[in-house]
Amino acid sequence: MNRTPRVHWISILLGLLVLMSVVSFHAYTAVKPEPVRHLGAVRELPEHTLALAFHGGPDPKWTPRALDVLRDAGVKATFFVTGTQVTRNPEVTRRIVAEGHQVGIDGFRVEGDHGDPLNLEFAQAALADALGVHARLVGAPAEVDSGDRDFQDIGTLVRMSLRAKGGVVRLHDDGSIGADIVRELVKEPGYRFVPVPGGQVVAASAAERFTGTVTTWSQRNGGVVLVLLGTAIAIAALLGILRTLMQLGLAHTDRRLRRESEQAPPPWFAPPVSVVVPAYNEALNIAATVRSIAANNHLADVEVIVVDDGSTDGTADRAEELDLPGVTVIRQANQGKPAALNAGIRRARHDVLVLLDGDTIFEPDTIGQLVQPFADNGVGAVSGNAKVGNRQGVLGRWQHLEYCAGSNLDRQILHALRCIPTVPGAIGAFRKAAITDVGGVSDATLAEDTDLTMAVTRAGWRVAYRPQAKAWTEAPVTVPSLFRQRYRWSYGTFQAMWKHRGALVERGPMGRFGLIYLVMFHLLLPLLAPMMDLYVAYGFLVADAPLAAVVWTVFLLLQTASAGYALRLDGESLKPLWAYPLQQIVYRQLMYAVVIQSLITAVHGTQLRWMSVRRTGRLADAPGGTVHVI
Amino acid sequence: MQVFVDGNGGRRVVARLVSLTVVSGLIAFAAVVGGTLLGAW
């Protein structure tokens, strides 16, 4: 019973299909095609026998008038109804039958709209919902046209109706004249009035009645669903715009402040540093990671502690083989990353700790840059700037774009708001006192980095961001491994948010901004954003395709411009920007799926294990190029 | 114990039951409506 829940995906897909069907059907019923008259079979009636056949209804105003006249004359007629009108006027339809008249089907949207069987079934479904019956009369038989569509003079119309001295007379109950013709016809001496032969209805099947309920509901309420969908999209769009504005505004301000501080730089701060590298099956990358740390140009002592958390691929051996001065390797049974970090922290000699993953490559000045904010005694943690080291392929480019345009810009906003929720595991530094204050690294969540950062912030420490401190990390190269990584991040972040929900009622930036920011942009927005895609699909397929294309393109251009700005801020080339529009089609949906899966897992209470990402050891875009040769 | 994790499994069982009920309902719904409409073909 510990399996990751999956059944909800069928529910979600079916639910979306139903939703799309409801709004599409609603739009479909609003379109009125040209009426097509089918010449029905001849129904032989005795001479001087008339069968009155009404079309175009039921109509809320004119059908009752025709019914009144028929009742007063004691004549039974046949009403060839239109499906959409039945749904709009079920009471009138019921009155037709209640007064003993016959019902046939003329089409679904207009007369003759039964060329394909689906339309016919829609009309039967509408009738099944309103009356619980299935009509046998489909399409009118050969008729004597009363001419009520073409002429106004009642004498002419009566003459036309009686020109065959009998037969099925074609009338319309969606206008005033039909009832007037009947009033005159019933006065004609020598005529007998009968319903159209063969028009008895039968009881509709349960499935047809249920389908009728659904199609009727869709016709009536599709507009409401569309409004609800539109509201969700409006909220998502507003959140998206708000985020973009915040990103651009705050990131710009943050950069300006940094430039000012660069013009009058504070004294260089160079405390001794302990670097802790927890590693589990990182044999492919660990040597490059440790070498890159050892090659630092920090102005004080740097000790490196590699904690091998029970690897089975010889990670510890790889690290020891390097035989680098100042590097210690600890081996422990597999206990998880938090335990490995705690073991390394316990062994650390210095008060400033740099924590990084076993697949991260540092630049020579990374450590020196990363520790600068610690010159301020109130700073308890510093986030560095994680960069994608393998940008080959579309997936690598997308992640590179997301790191720059998403995470890093986010971090700059949150830095300005003083509530960075995550110092990433790939590159972060902590004051030992801050970690001690919160009781070490907790294993209560799968995002131990977010959990630790939130705890440190709630303990009163400030968290800073140092974009100049760059670390190169290996991004997943396949969609499944990317999904697994993000699933863990997202689920872990939700765990940390829930664990630290108390911050909402505390005085402090984490509760006031941090958690609210995460709820708005990492929970609500990804959940609402799929509606945007659904709406665009609806726009393209059902509604106004050119308008949908324009709206979508404008949004895409805005987002691409924002991403371009983020790349510029991060000092990156604009070249990978071409992959951004494609990101909207696959990558973005993958990220929604991650959030939905995380939420469902949280509700189910499933124990999610650490899911490692398969390493390739190729960080071609990191300084030093390919770092491993198999 | 990790955050969200259901210790005794009760929540998981309830969540799975709800999930299965929803999916069965939707499948039955789609089968009846889709079957009736497409059956006309």
Image (spheres, coloured by chain):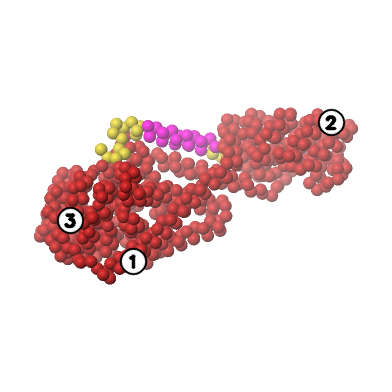
| Residue receiving disc 2 | A192
A537 drawn magenta:
no
Quadrant housing residue A9:
top left
| Residue receiving disc 1 | A256
Q: Earlier in the sequence, mark 2 or mark 1?
A: 2
The colour applied to the residues of chain A in this rendering is red
Element on which disc 2 rests = strand
Q: Position of residue A589 (x, y in %)?
A: 41, 51
Where does the C terminus of chain A fall, quadrant-wise? bottom left
Q: Earlier in the sequence, mark 1 or mark 3?
A: 1
- Seen from the viewer's position, the closer of residues A111 and A442 is A442
At x 26%, y 70%, the residue is A264
Residue at mark 3: chain: A
Where does the N terminus of chain A fall, quadrant-wise? top left
> Visible in this render: residue A461?
yes
The answer to whether marks 2 and 1 mark residues whose Cβ atoms lie closer than 8 Å is no
The colour applied to the residues of chain B in this rendering is yellow
At x 41%, y 56%, the residue is A243
Q: Amino acid at mark 1?
A: Arg
| Residue receiving disc 3 | A352
Using a 10 Å C-alpha cutoff, classify the residue at mark 3 as few (fewer than 14 neighbours), some (14 to 19) or many (20 or more).
many
Magenta stretch in the rendered image = B14-33
Mark 2 or 3: the one toward you? 3
